[in-house]
Amino acid sequence: MNETQQQPQEVPQLAEPVLLPPRGLWAVALALFVLTAIAGVLWAPPLRPRLQPNLTLDTWHDVDLAAMRQTDDALLRLTAASPEQRELERTIQAQFKLYLKREAALSGQTADDAAARMALGAVEESVRTLVQRHGADALRRLAVQFGRDVHAALATAIAAAHAARQPFAVHLQAQPLPADVSALTDLSGALGTTLERIGIDRQVHDGKLDPVAGQVIEAIAQVRFLQLGARVPGGAPQVASSEWFLVQHFRVEAHAGLDLQRRLALLDELATNDPAYPGEYARGILLAREEQFAKAIPWFERASRHGPFARQARDNARWCRERAQQAATLPPPPAP
């Protein structure tokens, strides 16, 4: 063998790092971790999802607004058939404006005012003549136009109040009256204040009045105008049933000035006249809003058996049951 040939060098053994666990420890640790997780799942107390009650009631928005407005548009396209009819319609509008001016001055309290009664009697006689000579649609057309005008004037006044960051009620009572409020008062008398009391100014989104709320305004104004037909033989013409139902839905669900008993009475009337209305669910909502949870439970349970609100009614019933139980375990309030 050649002495110059290099001898193979011995490869040194790598020292096992002190930071690494001994071989097999990783597998044991992983197994223990998995077993711990399984045990936690098997023996942990069951999680109860947090109930999410829903006490909103907004079926008054579920209307075919386009169809409703098409019906009113068709009435507006009816024109006076003769100069005599046009003159009579102008007389009615002037007489009604005179009465509304008196009504606004008296803040709506006209029953004991002789001048107001005389002005109202004059316009009612003119309306009787209009319907007798030209039919009920002539009066309905004037009512639709009045509703559109009130809607436009009120929307302008509400927008001005929002732009000024002022409550609408304060805006209506400002002195001297802003131009938009003065125009509204001249047109509708005390009706603007009435609409404020029902909370119509709350139905504003992105600075604009909700379109369905605008239709509620028009329907209420139409009803107000058609009341001028009190002396019409056979009774005054009525607002379209779809618009009347819209007003009734709004009164039950969104009116700001009614107490619970009045809402429940209106609900009974609405459920009788409109079988499709979810009366059981609505009654549960109204009671739960007033924290009458025990009374609300059976109505939610009935609503949970059928209808589009069945699932939410079940959740609301469970939530009301929990709230009722909590109320029952609370100590009585201290004596005054």
Image (cartoon, helix red, strand yellow):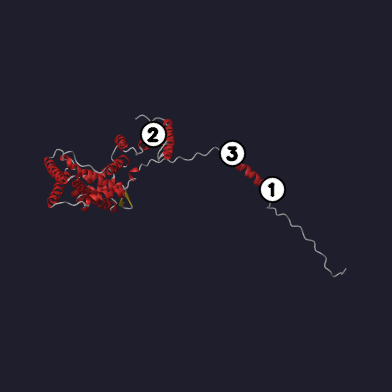
Q: Mark 1 — residue? A: 25
Q: Amino acid at mark 2?
A: Trp
> Looking at the figure, which quarter contains the C terminus?
top left
Rounded to the nearest whole Å, what is the CA distance between mark 3 and mark 1? 26 Å
> Mark 3 touching mark 2, by CB under 8 A?
no
SS state under label 2: helix
The x and y percentages for residue 121 are 13, 41
- According to the image, label 2 marks what residue? 299
Spot occupied by residue 158 in the image (x, y as percentages of width and height): 27, 50
Q: Amino acid at mark 3?
A: Leu
For the residues marked 1 and 2, what is the alpha-carbon distance in whole angstroms?
62 Å
Percent of width and height locating residue 173: 22, 47
Identify which residue is drawn at 17% across, 45% down: 135
Of the numbered discs 1 and 2, the one sitting upstream in the chain is 1
User: Does dot 1 land on a helix, a strand or a loop?
Assistant: helix
Kindly identify the residue that appears in the image at 14 percent across and 50 percent down. 85
The residue tagged 3 is 42
- The mark closer to the camera, 3 or 2, is 2
- Residue 210 seen in the current view: no
Looking at the picture, tell me which residue is in the foreground, 192 or 77: 77
